[in-house]
Every structure is written in structure tokens, then in C-alpha cells.
Image (cartoon, rainbow, N blue to C red):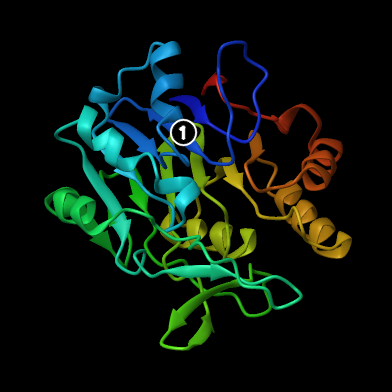
Amino acid sequence: MRISFLSENKTNNPGICAEHGLSIYIETDEMNILFDAGASDMFAENAQKMGIDLRNADFCVISHGHYDHTEGVPYFASLNKDAKIILHCEAYIDTYEIDANGRIDPVTTGIRWDEQVRKDLESRIIFTDRELWLSENIAVSGTIDDIEGSPMTEYFYEKRGDEYIKDPMNHEQFLAVRTEKGVFVFSGCSHRGVRPVLAHVKRLFPGEKIAGLAAGMHLYNADSRTRTEIVNEVAELDMEMVMPVHCTGIDAICELKTALGEKCIVASAGDIYEY
């Protein structure tokens, strides 16, 4: 399996650009998958510089309905005329960020495609709810199972009339790929929590080793106790690699690096890894 980071919040690679977004190109023996498409068309520019032909992607899997993972999808669809786009059935809701002082961001954090783009993409989209198996070894989770008491992101709200309702992030899903080394998991932001993601993987692949986790873990604004709990749980799985990216936050990345050593890989845009 080959993992290429086309878009990420940071880069150490000359000529490669970074943005607040995530896009990963995953090549397996069975198929090629674009996992998320960043916050702009930048992921495609980086792919070209990295020698990756996006026309060879068989699927585009979208982790959740936020702009920083979906803005590049229309451009991807213009390059690749055949790949199906896998999107959760609740991903089109408009959500807004509300800060601790009650200030509402006037621009949606959700998918920003206009109605024409949505109509143009309609025939390409497979809407998910439950898990969807792309092959015997590759699964998209659909709605991630809840775990009571697990910390999740709680400042995105859906506007319904004049009211704002907390978004339960039902539209978030992960991608899991079984290899000879074990199961590798890709999660966009883990808004529902890292713990539910890992528990859901174990349900889909009972008794199998989780070999790797490449994920935005959304711990950048978590308190130290929450960070420590998540870091310890991740460390206990003894995975071959953990790649904390995007919204994980520098404090959590440093704590994971301290706990895991070389098994924690600080990936950035332009990086390529093989497993």
C-alpha cells in the first residue's frame, strides 16, 4: 500500500503547498482511492508535482461534510470522469461554528458546492449510512458508532429556521484497508472521537490487528486530560504507525511522538509512505 499526502496543514517539501485541509491518495493492489479533497484545488496541483495521476483513482471517499475536505471534489470530478464519490447521506447539512462567546461564523463550515455542482455530481455519488464494502478488504464505515462519554467536537451547529442545533456529526465516516500487516485506518477529523473510530474498526474487522492510523484527531483545543487519555489509548494498540495530521494540534502531536517514538510519523503535504 502506498500513501501520498496531497493536502495537509503543513509541508516540509519544496514546491509543495499546504493549506488547512486534508487529502490522501491511497494505492492498494485492488484499487486506488482519493480520501478527501482538501479545501481547494491545491491537492490536484500537488498531485501533479508528485507524479500522481488522479485519473487513475477508482473512488473518492469523503470523510465528512466540511469544506476543508470537500472543496476540491468538483475539480477532481472534472479530471476523473469515472470514479464514484462516496459521501454520507447527511453530509449536505449546513453547519456553522459558534465560539465560546456565542459568536456565529456567518460562513458555513459545511460543503460549499452550489446547487448546479450538486446536480452535476449527483450521478457520481454513492450516499452511505451503514458500512459500505468496496471490496473484501476495504470498507467505508458509514455512521460511526457512539461511545457514551467519549469526547467529541461540540461547536458545530446546524441551522434549522431561526434555531441552531448541535451537529452530532453523524455524517462522519472513516476508510479502513486490510493488508497483510493488519488494518490501516484513515479518518478525516475524528469529530465523533478517536475512541469510537477505533472501536468501530474492531467491529468491522473482529480479532484483526489495527496496524496503522492516519487521522486528523481534532485535539488542538482539547484539554490536557483528554489529550493524555487519547494518547494512552492509541499507544496501547501498539500499531505499526500513527500519523496525526490536520486538526490534531501540535500539543497532541508532540505527546504522541513522545509516547510512540518512531512509530509516530508527523506527515505533511508531499510526503509518500509505503507499507
Disc 1 crowd rating (10 Å Cα; few below 14, some 14-19, many 20+) is many
Whether 141 is drawn above or below 248: the answer is below
Count numbered badges in the picture.
Answer: 1
For image coordinates 44% across by 37% down, the residue present is 40
- Please, what secondary structure does the residue beneath circle 1 have? strand
Residue 108 % position (x, y): 48, 63
- Residue at the extreme bottom of the image, as rendered: 162
Q: Is residue 239 left or right of residue 161?
A: right
Q: Locate residue 81, reporting x and y percent.
A: 15, 33
Q: Is residue 261 left or right of residue 149?
A: right
**Residue type for callout 1:** Ile
Instruction: Name the spot of residue 132 as percent of width and height, x first.
Output: 28, 56
In the rendered image, which quarter is residue 177 located in?
top left
Name the outermost residue toward the front: 106
Q: Position of residue 174 (x, y in %)?
A: 45, 53
The structure residue drawn at horizontal position 41% and vertical position 39%, both measured from the top left corner, is 37
* Residue at horizontal 65 percent and vertical 48 percent from the top: 247
Q: Which residue is mark 1?
A: 24
- The quadrant the N terminus occupies is top left
